Amino acid sequence: MTDKNTSRRTFLQMTGVGLAASPWLAACATAQSTSIPRRAQGMPWPNWGELPETPPGPPKAGSVGIAVVGLGGYGIGKSLPAVAEAEGTHVAAVVSGNPEKAAKVAAAYGLPDDAIYSYDTFARIAEDDRIEAVYIVLPTGLHAEWTEFAFAAGKHVICEKPMALTPAECERMIAASKRANKKLMIAYRCHFEPYNLKATELMKAGAIGAIQTIETTNCYTVGTATPADDWRLVKALTGGGALEDYGLYGLQATMYLTGETPSKVIGQTEWQTEDPRFTEIPATTRAEIHFPSGAVANLTTSYNMPGSNTVIATGTDGKLIMDPATYYDGNAMKLVKGDAETVLTPGASSVQFSRMVQHFADAIRKDVEIKTPGEMGLRDSKIIQAIYKSAQTGEAVTL
Ligand code: NAD
């Protein structure tokens, strides 16, 4: 739905015009021709994600019917199972540009043929009373417009993280939610994950004293993909790169652990534009994040480093080590005080997905306040843009 010129405009909005010649502008100039386009389109079966062996039973009375938009790895592997598993929701429809894939997924969830929508027929969900809400699991560059489409159809929206490419897009989504008088939630699963909840509770209770530093890493190697075959490497679909996709978990952790929002950031990006994987986005982003209390976090996120997913908070009285910190399952955590180490096992991490979706249902049915609203996504988008601005200008950015 977005042409080449619009994508270029979006890029300029994101990065700020008038910047000196830099890898950012060079990437913009070379982007597009061989990249996946910025419009919703059918894609092949993803490289992960399993279907249920038997369709879920009938929904409970009062259950919220959700249409899942985008049948990629996460949509099939996590979003659909979570919607089916949560007490108060059920899969009411699927939306995909690949009819064979949609039919296979619909059959696995026991959906009739008329509960399959394509991107072209999506607007018709407005007349489908089986659908009360929409779960957007599309590439990031499509979140804003599809969220707006869903609100225009009169549905509530839960949208995957990162919320959108820019603060302006996030604001559009929030405004659309208000206009439609429907709920908007960002699918920040870690706010429902036992280890991260316990860590937050411990930090609040002063378990390591006053937090001095937090180090976060969210890295992996993207393998041989290029912008022609992976939207995560396409600027117009992903934004700045690993920071939005993966480093966002570390960024969020620094905020829920300190209970603060940053006052200043210093960013640094590492470009490897000669590498066919990184012609449009930086391979690595680092940030120094300052908080009003004086705590300072150091964030590293990369698509070109060995896998790591850690949070280490050091306080005046001890250390909290989370490794892995924000996985789908199997997170691990210990408190270190002097020579004493306490391993904590607050519960199965895997409950986070269905708990998050249940919270969305509670917001719709019981008007419970959303823990991860659009405003949180907007906050994070502003911080991310400040990190990139600092990387481009070489100056610290005050928030
Ligand atoms: P994916 O590449 O596996 O799937 C994306 C799907 O979107 C495709 O299969 C296709 O059905 C659809 N699509 C429509 N237009 C497309 C286009 N132009 N290019 C590519 N796909 C297009 O991606 P994914 O890993 O499922 O990610 C989807 C969303 O879920 C993203 O917003 C991502 O950030 C989010 N996500 C969240 C988590 C988490 O832990 N919360 C983890 C992974 C992904």
Image (spheres, grey):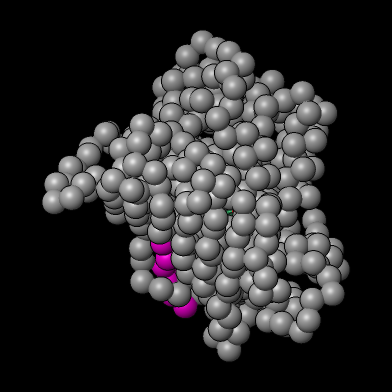
- The quadrant of the rendered image in which ligand 1 is seen is bottom right
Inspect this view and state whether residue 101 appears: no
Inspect this view and state whether residue 292 appears: yes
Against 180, is 326 above or below? Answer: below
What residue appears at the point 29 percent right and 50 percent down from the top-left corner? 319
Write down the quadrant of residue 112 in the picture: top right
Please state if 100 lies on the left or on the right of 393 as rendered.
left
Against 228, is 184 above or below? Answer: above
Of 138 and 43, the residue lying toward us: 138
Tell whether position 223 is magenta.
yes
What residue appears at the point 55 percent right and 30 percent down from the top-left corner? 371
Of all residues, the one furthest to the top in this rendering is 61
Q: How many marks?
A: 0
Of 117 and 241, the residue lying toward us: 241
Please state if 174 lies on the left or on the right of 55 as rendered.
right
Write down the quadrant of residue 276 in the picture: bottom right
Please state if 363 lies on the left or on the right of 146 as rendered.
left
* Range covered by the magenta-colored residues: 217-224
What residue appears at the point 28 percent right and 46 percent down from the top-left corner? 317
Tell me which secondary structure the magenta stretch mostly adopts.
strand
Of all residues, the one furthest to the bottom in this rendering is 274
Q: Name the quarter where the N terminus is drawn.
A: bottom right
Of 37 and 202, the residue lying toward us: 202
Q: Position of residue 249 (x, y in %)?
A: 48, 51
Q: Position of residue 113 (x, y in %)?
A: 60, 34
What residue appears at the point 62 percent right and 34 percent down from the top-left corner? 373
Against 143, is 193 above or below? Answer: above
Tell whether position 111 is magenta.
no
Of 235 and 58, the residue lying toward us: 235
Q: Position of residue 85 (x, y in %)?
A: 41, 28
Q: Position of residue 395 (x, y in %)?
A: 67, 70
